[in-house]
């Protein structure tokens, strides 16, 4: 008997046949997913009626000679009423939304918009010019539905003995590739390796993996999580950590997120790409969706399976749909909370994670405003308090801050030795103030963006803004204050105001004779970066204060030398200044320094 498609179906068919997806191969996953759904329903009805269900295979056959692709399941099948309803009208949600959008836009749908809606079964018409559906429900008669993509379809009786549905697609001349076993196997292994039911292609059973992410945590062993990770990421090593959870609201999803064992970016490979895939009921929607997570999460691997994703949505439109972002947000919050938990419960494990992946946390703290507060709790730094290089958190630091201390102090350098050899740390150590050590290129960027933590500002130890309390005990044998003042005037005149802004003797230095304090908004690290980026562009001269230590023998000697041998004193002062600039990372060239040193040495009389 001949039937007319509902007008809307005809519309959908026309669009599907003419444009819709560029990925023609997705019809395979649509048909497999329908076969899987039908098998799932059959299994459920058997199970709920107390019967045991036999193994429900999905059989795919390819026939290159005839140019056909067939798929057969032993699922619930369809009655003739169901055939008309399911394959002749727009009854299911994906296509319905599609048709509604079509109406709203008076038939003018741009390609991008079209892709936002699933058209499921009809996608087979992208590659087939004739489709035959043979079906039989448990207690119904065998039926044959047929359509050549026109506005009509036929339903005839058909002698079918087994329950289930067989779909035969006679491929268009341009798409005969889908009658190739290898091509189909490749498509299946990409999209359907986690389908619950065994899939046979021309009698050969495909290797399928169980969808472990849909099981409950208590059913799974660590080993199963690890095996799946290795399978999923094609890796030989076990993951460092994983998070598996299920939510029902605001979105239904199962998520399994892994932290890999290694960070390829640390090993000199290029920027990682996020590999957290999106699935809808075990069917792969997108292996690496953009907009799922912020950039800094690019180290994570795993998947999110949500039945709220329209199954047959195109990747491009999934990315635009906002749903990806919503899913990502929920998962990200949980993941960050998980890391906070690990940090609290297993500090060693967290430190191991941070050593490998800390720079992503830093990047996130600097750039991800929405999660900054929690991410900054996940930061770890070495500190002046622990010579063994233990990591401390900002919360630890703040809890140890002195009442009078306003800021969180940090020092930047290439390593611990370099930082501790500079003249800056001693003032803090002498006052019992902790300083965080930063060796990482991204640290200054982080400090510049983070600005504060629990309302405490970050302040670099070399900043002229740093005001420290006086040290309780008297500085011994210091140069008397009148002498200090005249010395300071002489230094200012001798160095010149283009080199220094102010000469100070605030008592910050303990052992070192001098230090320069940065008064610039440009940090020394930013300077180095700007210079590396554009070596020829001249940078404004650094603006610094010069601090002298009146208790230091060097300064006392300098004051004497100024009277006895003014010329030598000038050279020594310039040398001290360049030395301090060098320590601060602000000296542009050391040529003048070595030349001057020779001059000084020549003036020394035995
Ligand atoms: P969706 O799967 O999103 O519902 P489809 O266009 O893929 O939409 O399928 C339309 C309907 O046709 C399905 O909901 C189902 O009722 C029916 N159907 C499709 N394939 C099969 C099958 N192999 N066995 C039984 N019913 C099927
Ligand atoms: Mg479907």
Image (cartoon, rainbow, N blue to C red):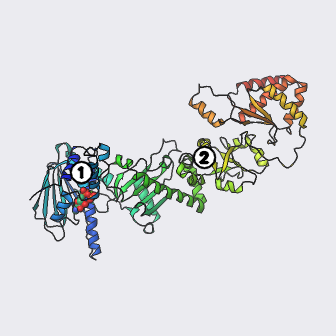
Could you tell me if residue 149 is visible in this image? yes
Question: Which residue is found at the position 84% from the left and 24% from the top?
Answer: 568
Give the residue displayed 65% in from the left and 28% down from the top. 540
The residue pinned by badge 1 equals 123
Residue 584, percent from left and from top: 71, 36
Q: Does the beta carbon at disc 2 come under 8 Å from ligand 1?
A: no
Q: Is residue 392 visible?
A: no
Q: Residues within 10 Å of mark 2 (few under 14, many from 20)?
A: some
Residue closest to the eye, 429 or 445: 445
Residue at x 29%, y 43% (from the top left corner): 111
Q: Quadrant of the N terminus?
A: bottom left
For the residue with label 1, is its CB less than 8 Å from the closest atom of ligand 1?
A: yes
Task: Name the residue tied to disc 2.
Answer: 450
Residue 438, above or below 33: above
Q: Which labelled disc corresponds to residue 295?
A: none
Judging depth in this view, the residue of 599 and 278 nearest the camera is 278
Q: Residue furthest bottom?
A: 50
Question: Residue 226's spot in the image, x, y percent?
Answer: 45, 59
Query: Which part of the image, by quadrant, shows the C terminus?
Result: top right
Residue 541: image quadrant is top right
Question: Taking 16 as reference, is 303 above or below it?
Answer: below
Q: Counting other residues with Cα less than 10 Å from the Cα at mark 1, is it few (<14), some (14-19), or many (20 or more)? A: many
Which callout, 1 or 2, points to the residue nearer the camera? Answer: 2
Disc 1 or 2, which lies upstream in sequence?
A: 1
Q: Secondary structure at mark 1?
A: helix
Number of numbered discs visible in the structure rendering: 2
Query: Which residue shows up at 80% across the image and 39% down it?
Result: 512
The extreme left residue here reads 1
State if disc 2 and disc 1 touch (CB < 8 Å). Answer: no
* Distance CA(mark 1)–CA(mark 2): 50 Å
Instruction: Determine whether the residue tagged by mark 2 lies in a helix, strand or loop.
Output: helix
């Amino acid at each position: 008997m001949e039937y007319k498609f509902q007008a809307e179906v005809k519309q959908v068919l026309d669009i599907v046949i003419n444009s819709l997806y560029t990925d023609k191969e997705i019809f395979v996953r649509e048909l497999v997913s329908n076969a899987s759904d039908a098998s799932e329903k059959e299994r459920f009805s058997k199970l709920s009626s107390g019967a045991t269900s036999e193994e429900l295979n999905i059989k795919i056959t390819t026939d290159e000679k005839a140019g056909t692709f067939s798929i057969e399941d032993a699922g619930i099948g369809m009655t003739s009423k169901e055939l008309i309803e399911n394959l002749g009208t727009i009854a299911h949600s994906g296509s319905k939304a599609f048709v509604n959008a079509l109406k709203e836009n008076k038939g003018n749908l741009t390609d991008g918009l079209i892709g936002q809606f699933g058209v499921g079964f009809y996608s087979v018409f992208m590659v087939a010019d004739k489709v035959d559906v043979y079906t039989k429900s448990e207690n119904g008669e065998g039926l044959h539905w047929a359509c050549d993509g026109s506005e009509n379809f036929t339903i005839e009786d058909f002698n079918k003995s087994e329950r289930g549905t067989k779909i035969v697609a006679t491929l268009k001349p341009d798409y005969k590739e889908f009658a190739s076993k290898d091509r189909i196997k490749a498509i299946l292994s990409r999209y359907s390796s986690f389908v619950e039911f065994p899939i046979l292609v021309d009698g050969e059973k495909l290797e399928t993996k169980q969808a472990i992410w849909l099981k409950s945590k208590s059913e799974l062993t660590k080993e199963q999580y690890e095996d799946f990770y290795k399978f999923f990421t094609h890796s030989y090593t076990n993951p460092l950590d994983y998070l598996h959870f299920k939510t029902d609201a605001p979105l239904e999803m199962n998520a399994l997120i892994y932290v890999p064992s290694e960070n390829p970016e640390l090993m000199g490979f290029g920027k990682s790409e996020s590999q957290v895939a999106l699935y809808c009921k075990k069917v792969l929607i997108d292996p690496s969706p953009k907009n799922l997570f912020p950039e800094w999460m690019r180290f994570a691997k795993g998947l999110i399976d949500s039945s709220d994703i329209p199954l047959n949505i195109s990747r491009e439109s999934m990315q635009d749909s906002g749903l990806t972002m919503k899913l990502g947000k929920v998962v990200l919050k949980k993941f960050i909370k998980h890391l906070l938990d690990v940090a609290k419960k297993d500090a060693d494990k967290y430190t191991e994670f941070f050593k490998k992946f800390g720079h992503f946390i830093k990047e996130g703290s600097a750039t991800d405003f929405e999660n900054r507060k929690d991410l900054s709790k996940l930061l770890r730094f070495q500190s002046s308090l622990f010579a063994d290089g233990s990591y401390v958190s900002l919360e630890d630091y703040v809890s140890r801050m002195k009442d009078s201390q306003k800021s969180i102090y940090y020092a930047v350098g290439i390593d611990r030795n370099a930082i501790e050899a500079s003249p800056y740390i001693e003032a803090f150590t002498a006052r019992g103030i902790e300083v965080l050590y930063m060796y990482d290129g991204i640290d200054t960027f982080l400090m510049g963006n983070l600005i504060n933590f629990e309302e405490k500002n970050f302040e670099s130890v070399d900043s002229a803004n740093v005001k420290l309390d006086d040290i309780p005990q008297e500085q011994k044998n210091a140069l008397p204050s009148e002498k200090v003042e005249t010395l300071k005037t002489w230094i200012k005149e001798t160095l010149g105001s283009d080199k220094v802004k102010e000469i100070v003797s605030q008592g910050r230095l303990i052992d070192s004779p001098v230090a320069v304090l940065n008064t610039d908004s440009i940090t020394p690290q930013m300077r180095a970066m700007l210079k590396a980026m554009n070596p020829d562009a001249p940078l404004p001269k650094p603006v610094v204060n010069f601090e002298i230590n009146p208790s230091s023998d060097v300064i006392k000697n300098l004051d004497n030398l100024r009277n006895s041998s003014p010329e030598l004193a000038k050279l020594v002062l310039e040398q001290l200044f360049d030395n301090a600039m060098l320590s601060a990372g602000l000296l542009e060239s050391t040529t003048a320094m070595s030349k001057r040193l020779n001059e000084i040495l020549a003036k020394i009389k035995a």
